[in-house]
Image (cartoon, rainbow, N blue to C red):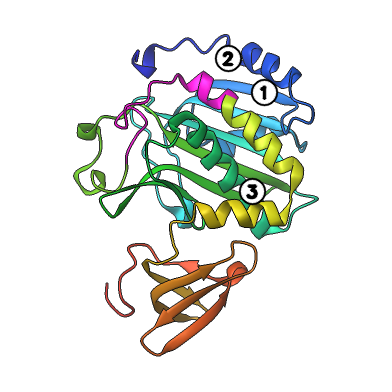
């Protein structure tokens, strides 16, 4: 695959417009492609002008971030960073988050087929399960800022193992490392199609069914925080719209999705 830094992005918007013309109810009404930005979330606010329906794509993102203020490593145009400015009128926050996760997962699943164990790691990661370890291939960041709902998506595209910082090499992975050759333009076109389909339906039953099949959490040892209390145990059930059930040493607990936080690293409670 050609190195991402040599991609000519000048024709991206017109190609995407062609894709949009063939979608019955596209989530996107206007496309902006920029060479470089510190954050697609910040740039989307600037270009949206208080209107929904924008897709902001950057060839390079220099200061990307994930959930809880964590940094998102882009490197030398290794990723596909983009932000959708959406109208969440038909979805509450958990339904919106789950719909986006299903769309990103389906985008990558149609590319990979059944060759790999691709999973949704609640609340906002798409991972490949490799010898029992979840390695992140895509991440989602949903924010409400300046009166807009921003859906930021980053997909690892062209990294080699040596490109990752040592502490990330066993926890992140790219499409290139997995053996899939796809341009970032083709990838974002696929993403728009699946985002439009999932966002257009807001079908809670369909979301639950898809999530259940592709859930990375159930049956694994995880740590969550709810109401200033830590819970560490085996996830027995996870409904991305309502609640999760976790079996801990002091009993089985049902935690509401909207108020529960997944603790990074899944360390036992009290251990740093």
The span from disc 1 to disc 2 (Cα, nearest Å) is: 9 Å
Q: Could one spot residue 132 in this view of the protein? A: yes
Q: Quadrant of the N terminus?
A: top left
Residue placed furthest toward the bottom: 250
Question: Which is nearer the N-term, disc 3 or disc 1?
Answer: 1
Quarter occupied by residue 78:
top left
x%, y% of residue 25?
79, 31
The span from disc 3 to disc 2 (Cα, nearest Å) is: 25 Å
Q: Which residue is mark 2?
A: 12
> Is residue 93 left or right of 243 when viewed as pictured?
right
Q: Which residue is mark 1?
A: 31
Q: Which residue is mark 3?
A: 99
Question: Circle 1 sits in a helix, a strand or a loop, which is it?
Answer: strand
Stretch of the chain drawn in magenta: 173-189
In the displayed structure, 80 sits above or below 140; it is: above
Marks 1,2: beta carbons within 8 A: yes
Marks 3,1: beta carbons within 8 A: no
């Amino acid at each position: 695959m050609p190195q991402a830094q040599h991609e000519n992005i000048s024709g991206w918007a017109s190609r995407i417009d062609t894709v949009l013309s063939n979608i019955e109810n596209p989530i996107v009404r206007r496309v902006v492609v920029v060479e470089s930005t510190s954050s697609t979330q910040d740039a989307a606010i600037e270009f949206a002008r208080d209107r929904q329906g924008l897709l902001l794509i950057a060839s390079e993102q220099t200061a990307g971030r994930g959930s809880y203020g964590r940094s998102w490593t882009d490197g030398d145009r290794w990723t596909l960073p983009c932000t959708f400015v959406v109208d969440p009128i038909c979805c509450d926050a958990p339904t919106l988050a789950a719909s986006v996760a299903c769309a990103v997962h389906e985008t990558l699943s149609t590319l990979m087929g059944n060759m790999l164990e691709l999973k949704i790691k609640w609340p906002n990661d798409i991972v490949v399960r490799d010898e029992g370890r979840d390695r992140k291939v895509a991440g989602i960041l949903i924010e409400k800022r300046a009166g807009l709902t921003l859906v930021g998506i980053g997909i690892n595209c062209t990294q080699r193992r040596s490109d990752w910082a040592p502490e990330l090499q066993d926890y992140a992975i790219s499409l290139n490392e997995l053996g899939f050759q796809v341009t970032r333009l083709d990838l974002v076109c696929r993403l728009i199609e699946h985002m439009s389909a999932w966002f257009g339906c807001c079908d809670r039953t369909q979301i639950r069914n898809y999530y259940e099949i592709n859930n990375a959490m159930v049956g694994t040892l995880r740590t969550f925080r709810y109401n200033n209390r830590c819970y560490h145990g085996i996830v027995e059930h996870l409904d991305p719209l309502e609640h999760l059930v976790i079996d801990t040493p002091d009993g089985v607990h049902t935690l509401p999705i909207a108020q529960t936080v997944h603790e990074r690293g899944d360390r036992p409670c009290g251990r740093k």
